[in-house]
Image (spheres, grey):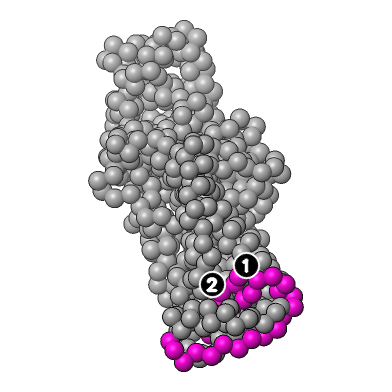
């Protein structure tokens, strides 16, 4: 510790003041401290005392900052407590009563190097990992590296005005994002600032971006379905509320489309959606927002966007920020669906950060903690216990593979963290099988318990039938004369595959899916030409809506398919097909 303390003020202190300063300093730093006076007329009223790296800022500016910090503290407190006016008033009164000048040193550091969104600064000895620091230019950063005598900071803004030697101050806060119902229908950046030009967003408090995942006691099993409206997923790979289901596939295989269709299908289902776009082109995000707006889905959706041109630190915290918004709704007992599009780009942003922070690269140049990067994110998805309101956070992370290689580093990591994956295949996609779900490689590990009874009963042996079809298809590829039974089996399989095709933005309701499945597995479509099968399906569904609306309503409302209803569907479908033929 420097044994000299410097007092900056416009006027030299008088004798009594000097004694008071010395008493304060000796208390803090020991007896052999010397007080030097430095005249600084710019300070006017007030003064600044420095001792080594400790700064006691009692200038008008410093006091104002203290007051602002106090107000910010009060505001974050408001988010936690009920914001009743009486309580708020008591809080203000208490803060005024408790107000005293800060005698804890306000640490300041100096920038050593800056570049690529990374700052290395000296000083700030007691700063903590993950703390937010503020630079002179007003730009904020997050401490991501603590080394001996210096810290590494990632910047959340422009590094233009930060130069070597500029000041950096602690805030003693970790990264947070404002949250509130006002965020529904908005497009925001990773720090919660609006990007849609619709004005300020009224928030309801602050939430830390990084939060611990709910523990075992706070959870309950996944037991409610999260319908995607896609026949190929809801029938064979059902997703439950609170589950984490990975959507994985090469580029341009319809990954985003599945996620967006799932959002569209939540209309009037009471599920709130959050779409986190990481490292995407701004035009792609604009297109997605356009679809959501057109289908009136923005009213229950929040879009968090950190596009490819945003600095890597923003791309890095975007999914955590989105999750914080999701957790706010989940804590209020709501069911929330969150989509991370996509985590490969997230890992790449984190790799860029880590390399710039000079962390040692591991496999594929990713840092050693890249597994923890995603596990701590996806663990926050949960179905909360009834005592905690019973809300849920369902995650649909998206991962892009290269040439269908699921055994690359990031895909294997995320496959092992999630509760299943929907594997999309380029070959299927280009053959026109859309959504291009590979039935053999996809799996849902917990969703079965959440599937509605009607759906379970309706899909019967669908997966098995398709597996048999695939096997047979391979063996019969080159043979021309097939026996009647094999030909029939092949045609049935082909028909099933065709029925699983679904155009984007056209989700099917539960009863529609049940009707298609029951009539398909009962071979009702056997005589329909393969090219016409989808048209016939649509006509059949229209027919049911028109003539059998009672049956549709029963299935939709109870989620149960009775034996008589099943029989009825088969009879009606067969009758309908007869008229078609
Ligand atoms: P990227 O790798 O670029 O993120 P992606 O895997 O997210 O691509 P999408 O953007 O969802 O793929 O889809 C690619 C294209 O395929 C889009 O033009 C989309 O409209 C089309 N597409 C996706 N699914 C379907 C579908 N079920 N029916 C018709 N077209 C589809
Ligand atoms: Mg996409």
Q: Position of residue 229 (x, y in %)?
A: 46, 31
Judged from this view, the residue extending furthest toward the right is 41
Q: Is residue 526 above or below residue 494?
A: above
Q: Which mark is residue 106?
A: 2
- Horizontal relation, residue 219 to residue 548: left or right: left
Q: Is residue 310 above or below residue 17?
A: above
Q: Nearer the viewer, residue 286 or 219?
A: 219
Q: Residue at x 51, y 62 (%)?
A: 100
Which residue position holds label 1? 62
Q: Residue at x 67, y 78 (%)?
A: 9
Q: Residue at x 43, y 87 (%)?
A: 30
Secondary structure of the residue carrying numbered label 2: loop
Residue 294 in view of the camera: yes
How crowded is the residue under tag 1: few (<14 C-alpha within 10 Å), some, or many (20+)? some
First-in-chain label (1 vs 2): 1
Point out the stretch of residues depicted in magenta: 30-58
Q: Say if the magenta span includes residue 56.
A: yes
Secondary structure of the residue carrying numbered label 1: helix
């Amino acid at each position: 510790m420097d044994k000299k303390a410097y007092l900056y003020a416009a006027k030299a202190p008088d004798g009594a003041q000097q004694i008071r300063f010395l008493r304060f300093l000796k208390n803090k730093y020991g007896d052999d401290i010397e007080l030097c006076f430095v005249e600084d007329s710019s300070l006017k009223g007030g003064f600044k005392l420095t001792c080594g790296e400790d700064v006691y800022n009692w200038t008008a500016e410093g006091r104002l900052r203290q007051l602002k910090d106090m107000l910010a503290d009060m505001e974050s407190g408001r988010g936690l407590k009920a914001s009743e006016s009486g309580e708020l008033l008591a809080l203000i009164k208490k803060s005024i009563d408790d107000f005293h000048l800060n005698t804890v040193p306000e640490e300041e550091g100096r920038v050593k190097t800056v570049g690529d969104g990374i700052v290395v600064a000296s000083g700030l000895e007691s700063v903590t990992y993950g703390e937010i620091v503020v630079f002179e230019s007003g730009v904020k950063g997050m401490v991501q590296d603590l080394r001996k005598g210096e810290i590494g900071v990632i910047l959340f803004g422009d590094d233009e005005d930060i130069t070597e030697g500029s000041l950096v101050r602690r805030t003693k806060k970790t990264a947070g994002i404002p949250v509130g119902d006002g965020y529904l229908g908005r497009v925001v950046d990773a720090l919660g600032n609006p990007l849609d030009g619709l004005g300020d967003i009224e928030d309801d408090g602050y939430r830390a971006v990084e939060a611990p995942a709910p523990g075992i006691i706070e959870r309950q099993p996944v037991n409610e379905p999260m319908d995607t409206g896609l026949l190929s997923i809801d029938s064979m790979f059902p997703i439950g509320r609170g589950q984490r289901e990975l959507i994985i596939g090469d580029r341009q295989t319809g990954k985003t489309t599945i996620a967006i269709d799932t959002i569209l299908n939540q209309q009037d289902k009471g599920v709130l959606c959050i779409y986190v776009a990481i490292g995407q082109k701004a035009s792609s995000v604009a297109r997605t927002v356009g679809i959501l707006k057109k289908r009136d889905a923005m009213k229950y959706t929040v879009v968090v966007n950190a596009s490819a041109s945003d600095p890597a630190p923003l791309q890095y915290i975007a999914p955590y920020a989105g999750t914080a918004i999701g957790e706010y709704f989940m804590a209020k007992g709501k069911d929330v669906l969150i989509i991370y599009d996509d985590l490969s780009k997230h890992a790449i942003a984190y790799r860029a950060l880590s390399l710039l922070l000079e962390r040692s690269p591991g496999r594929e140049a990713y840092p050693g903690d890249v597994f923890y990067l995603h596990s701590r994110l996806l663990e926050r998805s949960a179905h909360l216990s009834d005592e905690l309101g019973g809300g849920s956070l369902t995650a649909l992370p998206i991962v892009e593979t290269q040439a269908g290689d699921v055994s690359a580093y990031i895909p294997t990591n995320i496959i092992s963290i999630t509760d299943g994956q929907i594997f999309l295949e380029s070959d299927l996609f280009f053959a026109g099988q859309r959504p291009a779900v590979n039935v053999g490689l996809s799996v849902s590990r917990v969703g079965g318990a959440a599937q509605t009874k009607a759906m379970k009963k309706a899909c019967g042996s669908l997966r098995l039938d398709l597996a048999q079809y695939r096997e047979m298809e391979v063996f019969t590829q080159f043979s021309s004369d097939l026996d009647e039974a094999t030909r029939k089996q092949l045609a049935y399989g082909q028909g099933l595959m065709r029925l699983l095709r679904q155009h984007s933005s056209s989700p099917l309701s539960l009863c529609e899916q049940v009707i298609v499945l029951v009539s398909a597995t009962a071979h009702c479509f056997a005589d329909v030409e393969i090219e016409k099968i989808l048209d016939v399906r649509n006509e059949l569904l229209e027919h049911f809506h028109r003539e059998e609306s009672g049956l549709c309503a029963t299935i939709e409302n109870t989620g149960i398919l009775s034996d008589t209803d099943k029989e009825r569907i088969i009879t009606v479908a067969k009758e309908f097909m007869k008229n078609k033929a």
